[in-house]
Structure formats: structure tokens, C-alpha cells
Amino acid sequence: MDSPEIPKIMSNTSPSSDSPPVQESPVFSYISNLSPIQPVKASHAAQGFPGLSSPPLVFTSPRVNTLRETSFLKRPQYPQLSSAEKPKAQDEAKKFVDGPVDSKKHITQLQMGSITDTQDCETNSSSEGVDEYLADPMEMDGTNSAQSVNPCLKESKNSYKSEEPSEQATEDLQGKQTFDAKPVKIKELSHGALPSSERPKVGSRISVDNAFNGEYHHGLHNQSQGFGGEYQDDCDHTRQSPPGRLQIGQVYEDCRENVGGTSKGMIGNMILHAPNKVKNDQGGMHRRCLQFEEAPPCATGKRDSSSKEKVNNSEPPASTAELEIVKVSYAATSKRQMGASLPPLYGGSSPLTVPKPSGIGLHLNSIVNAVPVVRGATTSIRLADHYIGLQVMKSSAVVSHLLLENVRGDTETSIAASSSITQSPHTVEFEHHGSPLEERKSDSQNVDSYKELNQYSSQKKRKRTPSSKDSDGCKRCNCKKTKCLKLYCDCFAAGVYCAETCACQGCFNIPDYEDTVLETRQQIEARNPFAFAPKIVQLEEEIQFTPASARHKRGCNCKKSMCLKKYCECYQANVGCSSGCRCDGCKNVYGRKGDYGPIDHGVTKDMISDKAGKETFDEKLEMVATKKDALSIELYDSHNHTPLTPSIQCSDHTDNVPKSPCLITSYLRSPESDLTVISSYEKSTISSLRNSETSGILLETSKELSDMGYYCWQEDYDNIGIADTFSPRHDAAPTICHITPLSDLCSKASASSTSSRSHWKNASQIQLCPGSQGLSSNSSLRWCSSPLTPMTRLGGTECSPGVDFDHGLSDIMQEEMPEILKDISATNKSVKVSSPNKKRVSPPHNHNHELGASSSGSLRSGRKFILKAVPSFPPLTPCSSSKGSNTIQSTGNLHDKGRKK
DNA sequence: GAGTTTGAAACT
DNA sequence: CAGTTTCAAACTC
Ligand SMILES: [Zn+2]
Ligand SMILES: [Zn+2]
Ligand SMILES: [Zn+2]
Ligand SMILES: [Zn+2]
Ligand SMILES: [Zn+2]
Ligand SMILES: [Zn+2]
């Protein structure tokens, strides 16, 4: 499998990178104009912000529209792609895939809820029909790798196929159709997923999501930073990386391109460009961040190289020609490329370009959801918003990361990434070990092989130290048997792609394998809808953000550590144990099981709320979560920024918290999960709405957001956070998410548009650094900026390693975010108060998830989700970058990616 | 850096 | 849902 897959990938990649071409589109020019590296801030302000920020409020809606358009566009692209690729599709493997794929895709779509979307796409696109679309993807793959090899899709999926090619594929399809509910089938699913991505339907969703994501990233980045050119690269890389993903990613990308081209043309382009540039500029940093966020979409990290090209292509495509280009790219490039390139075939749909977010691919999923809804324009718009938001977030984050990282040395990565980007990542991307998904189920065997391969490729990287954290402070994993597709992997669990710094072997948690990652996520979510929800929630609803109030949703089960070591998740997240904990002899310094406000005690608000009531822990948590998210965010911000608590966090533990990988990436939620989540989200959102002033829109949005999860919170945060308080402390704040952008987007989008809902799901993944879940206190939160001084956050305390990031982010955020946030806030909530701008931020999807996750409670508050934090960890930077860089590196080897090189 | 401990995640 | 196994991190040396 590996081999086959890999080869496939390779083939794909190469093409993709090469093919890409295109770029003519205005965007291109745009980008070119923009220097790749524009100053981050400046760029942010200019690009990012401009679009995002200032526009945001006003813009938001418009953009949204644009975005939507893009999504549509994307769809069209699919067809084109398909057509172009079809030839390849012919490949046997592909055929299988197609068939299966289609079904799978559908399934996936269904799961995602994007099905409609895809259809839309198709319709938009052209004629070809879904099948064709599907075929396209396949073709793509095929082209790239040819049957056996076929890259992307195949890779992951195919790998499977390779094993059992046709039949399996069919089976898979069937299964998928059924839906696969089964996890087992995951592999199949994955296959299906991949296919799905490829497929029009799926693609549509995916594309949408991706687009969003990508756009987000891109957009954000661009806007914020304005590195368009680079950014693209990044995207490309990511995309490229995983063929399988690519398919999906490609789709997304296509969408983006389309969107860009079609919709706004300039704007769209801008966005796209910007993002691209951003990536580039930011280099590693951005990538990291972006990647995460973007990653999914773009494939953030790892595969960037190809993606860039793709991106470029895509951008250009904005115009009609684009389609062709796109096709080409598709064919040539692997999935990723495809995505990137996407072009606007359609135009028709034209849309917007929203950027797909390749990187975020995962997110995309969520997006996808949105798409369906949208179908019409609305959804897309939302998506766009989301993306934008995300991008912004990312960008900011990324930027910060980049900066930080660069400073740190990450620069290398970034640089590398850049360079790598240029390179053709394909090879790397494809490593494909087979689809990760498969691995488990069936593949343990494969896995091994994969591993070997991966390792093989990984070779280099493998990253440095196994230590959990990178220099950056981001966490990184060291997974050896799980391919980073299980919750055992901190990166995966955090919803972020593995970074270069990860020392994992056979890693599939990279943008290249976005499809696989998403599928896997979905499977896991199917089991446990809250699996990716933030683990830490604030107890009280609003208010307090304080860290103190935060708690683990699930609680710990410590038997021997007395919750005094990091073995305890509660302690690790810098939160006290709650009634939900089943620990023995709890001595958690942050608060023992029965106490509520342990440390914080300050939590005042909590108090208010009560923890006492505790009622269900969950509920509280949920509540908290909701708020918490906000809080945490705020807290973080505050911490960071504000003096108030900051110290606390820092002091507490910076370390503790943080480990999470930085990645921002987030995958989105799986459709399924999304759905479920959504519902919950909806609730939450609703509640949030209630709570906050936000407009009614929120509700819808919330749903969508929910998907987004991460993103959503921002709103909440704003509302909540600010509102509440700040309180302080929180030290730990665990995880908060940086993600903001997404949230913002989400919120906005949601607000603006209507239905998209599903989209968000995808977003959820975004993530930040893994470590964070807990939140690191610092970083994550920061964003939010608490009312107090948001900005500060970083400054000082930042205790956690991630901090830099945060800071950077925060700054960025502030600059960039603000607008967005504002928009969001304005729209939604209004944010609360204080926090203005900054905050918004974003957190990440995770939050949403969490909320959702929080099960009961969380759901309600739509916003909540947010909080959770997903993010916490470290935000981004490191991770993402790492991967990104990895990507680059890896690009060479597909494996790498996994490996990171 | 190897080896042990730990508790969550995954699996049955 | 409980019990067991697997896993990777946290911790120890
Ligand atoms: Zn891992
Ligand atoms: Zn990792
Ligand atoms: Zn990994
Ligand atoms: Zn414990
Ligand atoms: Zn506990
Ligand atoms: Zn305890």
C-alpha cells in the first residue's frame, strides 16, 4: 500500500506542482504585486485587515457573498477538473475509486452534509455531473500516480485499493453509502473520503470547506499579512502533500480559485493572493499557523510546495481560463494541487473564491456543510466569512508564529517551507502510506509498511527531539504506531496537523492526507462526538473566564498521580479537578475535585454561576465552556495582554499547558460529528445568542459555527469573555484557542449567511496547537484579549512557550483580528465589551466541539464550543510551521510529510 | 537516551 | 458498560 500509494502520490505531486500553472488571474498579479513577504503587520493591516478587518463589518456580508460565490465556483471547478483529469480517472484504480469513491464521497458528503453542496457544485460546474467530478478526482489521482500509484486519493484510499483494488473500492463505496458508519470502514471511508473529496459531491463540500479554510487562511493571511505569494505556496504545499487530501483539498482549492476569480475578482483574488503571500511571507510561521488552520485545507504544513503552485494556478483561474488551468493542475498536481488550482471554472459558481482553505481542509469539511446550504450563495458567503476569519486568525497566528518562529529559528522552516513549496512536494506528499485510516483497521499491516515508508522518508526529520515540545514551544508528537490518526496523538487530538517538529513516524496527520485525517476524525467523532471537543471547559458560563473556572469535561481518572503530575489531564491543563473527575486522592493544585474554584477561586463568576450547582458537571462545564471558551480566550488574552491575570497563567504553568502542538490547523469536524455537534452547537449558539446579544443570526451561524467550532467561539468569547470578565486568572486557561479567525469567520459567516452550518464543522479542527487543549493558558487565550489589555498578553507572561505565538498572534490578531472580530462581534455579539477587537479571535473550533462535546451543556451554548479550547495549546505556530516546513521537506518525500521530515 | 510509569484511548 | 489492551506522554534514572 504504501508503495503504491506513495508512488501515486508522487506522480500526482509532480504534476500538480508542475501543472499548476496558471496564475494569471488578477489574483496572480495581485500576488505578484504583493511582495511575498510584506511585513506581516503591514500586510495584515493592509491585506488582511483591509479585507477582513475593515471590510469585515461591512464587508462581511459582502464577502460572504463572495465567498459563497467562490464556493460555487469551486464546484464548477470540479467538473472541470474532472474533465481534465478524467483521462486519468480512467485509470483502473481510479475507476474503482470513482465508483467507490463516488459512493464514498457521497457518503462522506452526507456525513458532512455537504452532499448537496457537491451537487451544487456539480450543477454549477458544468455539466459533467457528479460522477465526472468524482472521476476527476480519481483521475487526478490516476494521473498523478496512475492506477496503482495514484496518488492522493488512492494513496490514502487507494492504498487500500491497491490492496484490494476494485472490489474494495466498491465495497467501500457501498459501505460509505451506507455510510459507513462504521468506523471500521474508516479505511474505506477514508478511501471514500478521499474519493469524496475528489468527487464532485464530496468535493463540493469539501471544496467548500476547504475553500473556506483555504480562503480563510489565505485570505486571512493575505489580508493580514499580505504575503499572498508565499501564502499560496504554503497552501499548495499543504494541498499537495496528500494526494488523497489533495483531492479534497484540490476541490477546495478549485473552489477557491473559482471563487476568487469569479466572485470578486479582485477581492477574491486579493484574498487568495493574500493568503498565499502570507504563507510565503510568514514562511514557516505562517505555514505552521496557517497550516493548521489552513492546513487542512491546504494541507498546511507539509505539502505546501505543490500547493503553492496550485494556489497560484487557482488564483489566476479566477477567470475563466482558470478552469482549464485548474484541470491541468489537477491532473498534474495531485489532489492538493488540484485544490489549489482550482480555478474558477465555473465561475459560475463563481464564486468566490473563497479561499478554500486548503489547509484547513478539515475545516473545509465544515465548510462543505455550509456549501450545501449555501448552494446558493449564502452558504458560500458564510463560508467565505469563516474562512476569512479563519484566515485572519491564522494569518495573525501564523504571522506571529512566523515571527516568533523565525526568530527562534523556525525561520528555517519557514524558509524551507517556502523553498520547499516551490519544490514540488508531490513526491513527498504522496507518501501515502496508505491511508491512515485504513491503517488501523485493516492495516495494521499496512501501517507497518507505512511506517516504514514514512519513517523511511521521514528520515530526516523525524524530528528532532522527541521531546514533546518544539523549541517553539509547540508540542509535537512522537507517535510511532498510530500514524497520528488517533487520539493518542496530541496533534491529531488537538485537531492540528503534525508539524515538522513532530517526531512521529508514518504520520498521516498532515495536509497531504487531509482526506484521511478528516475521515478518521469523522470516524472518531462518530464514536464520540465530543472526541475533538475541547477538553477543558469553563465552568461558569460567562463570566469568568477565569481559568479557575475551567475544568476538564471528562475529568481525570488518576489513580496514582494524585493529580499532581501531568499524567493528570486536569493538572496538565492547569485546571482543577471537578466533580467529573474520578481521581483517587486528588491533590490537584489547581483545585481538587470537590472544590470549585480552586485556584481561582477567584473565579468569581463561577461562583456565580455556580458551580456549586454543578449540576452536572457537564452542564456547568458546558456553560462554562461556552463562556469558557470565551473566558478562556479572554483569559488568555487577558493573561497575555492583561496584566491582570496574566501572571497567573504564566506563573502557573505556562509550561503545563501548553504543549499542544501549535498547529492551527484544524481539521474540521467530520460531517457526522458536525451534524450532531451542530445540533448541539445550535443549541449553544442559540443560547449564546440569547445570552449575548448577538443577533439572531447567530443561531444559524452558530450551527454552522458549531461546525466551525473553533471559530465560533470567538464570538462567544467576545461576548462572554469580555463581558465577563476577565477575570482573571485563569491561569491556565487552558486552551484557548487561537483559532479565532475561524471563529470569526464562522460567526460572521454564520451571521451573514444563513445556513451553512455544516461548514463549520470542518472548521473545528482547526486547531491550534495540540497541546493546548488545555490551554495553555497563555497563549491561547490571549487572543481574546481580554478586556483588559489585550495586547499585553503576550508580553509578559506568555509563559508558555506558545506564547510567542500568542503574542504574535495577539498582535496580529489585534490588528487583524479586530476587524474581523469586530465584525463578528458586531454582528454577533457585539461583543462584549471589551474585547474588542482583539479578541475575537478565535478560537478554534475546538471550542465548539467541546461545547458540543461537552455534551449536554455545551451544545446549548452555541458558542461555547469555542472555548474549549481546543486550542489551547500552543498555538500554532510551531506546530504548524513545523509541519509546513515538514511539508516542504517532506514534500520531497511523501513520507516525509508524515514524517515530517 | 533508555527505561519505567501513568492514565487515556482504543479495543473487546 | 466493564475489562483489557494499546499507546504515547510524563516521568525517572
Ligand atoms: Zn502524532
Ligand atoms: Zn504531531
Ligand atoms: Zn504526526
Ligand atoms: Zn487527575
Ligand atoms: Zn481531574
Ligand atoms: Zn484530581
Image (tube, coloured by chain):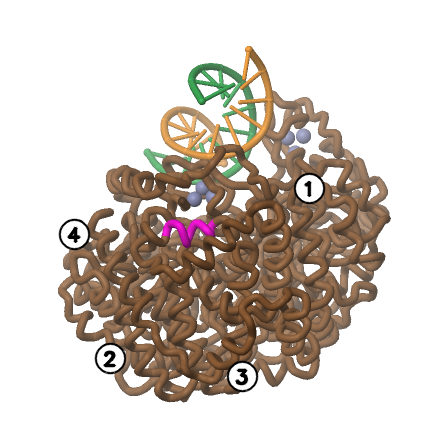
Chain colours: A brown, B green, C orange
Which one is closest to the eye, mark 1 or mark 2? 1
Q: Which residues are magenta?
A: A883-890
Chain of residue at mark 2: A
Along the line of sight, the residue nearer the viewer: A367 or A755? A367
Whole-angstrom CA distance, mark 2 to mark 4, is 26 Å
Amino acid bearing label 1: Ser
- Assess whether mark 1 and mark 4 are in contact (beta carbons under 8 angstroms): no
Residue identifier under label 1: A800
Question: In the rendered view, does A424 fall on the left or right side of A256?
Answer: left
Amino acid bearing label 4: Glu
Chain of residue at mark 4: A
Rendered-image quarter of ligand 6:
top right
Pointer 2 residue Cβ closer than 8 Å to ligand 3: no
Say the numbered circle drawn on residue A83: 2
Whole-angstrom CA distance, mark 4 to mark 3, is 42 Å
Task: Evaluate whether residue A665 shows in this view.
Answer: no
Q: Residues within 10 Å of mark 2 (few under 14, many from 20)?
A: many
Badge 2 or badge 3: first in the primary sequence = 3
Query: SS for tag 3?
Result: helix
Badge 1 or badge 2: first in the primary sequence = 2
Query: SS for tag 4?
Result: loop
Whole-angstrom CA distance, mark 2 to mark 3, is 25 Å
Residue identifier under label 3: A66
Q: Residues within 10 Å of mark 1 (few under 14, many from 20)?
A: many
State the image coordinates of residue A597 (x, y, percent, origin top left): 80, 39
Query: SS for tag 2?
Result: helix
Query: SS for tag 1?
Result: loop
Say the numbered circle drawn on residue A164: 4
Along the line of sight, the residue nearer the viewer: A291 or A561? A291
In percent of the image, x 41 and y 54: which residue is there? A888
Amino acid bearing label 3: Thr
State the image coordinates of residue A23 (x, y, percent, origin top left): 40, 78
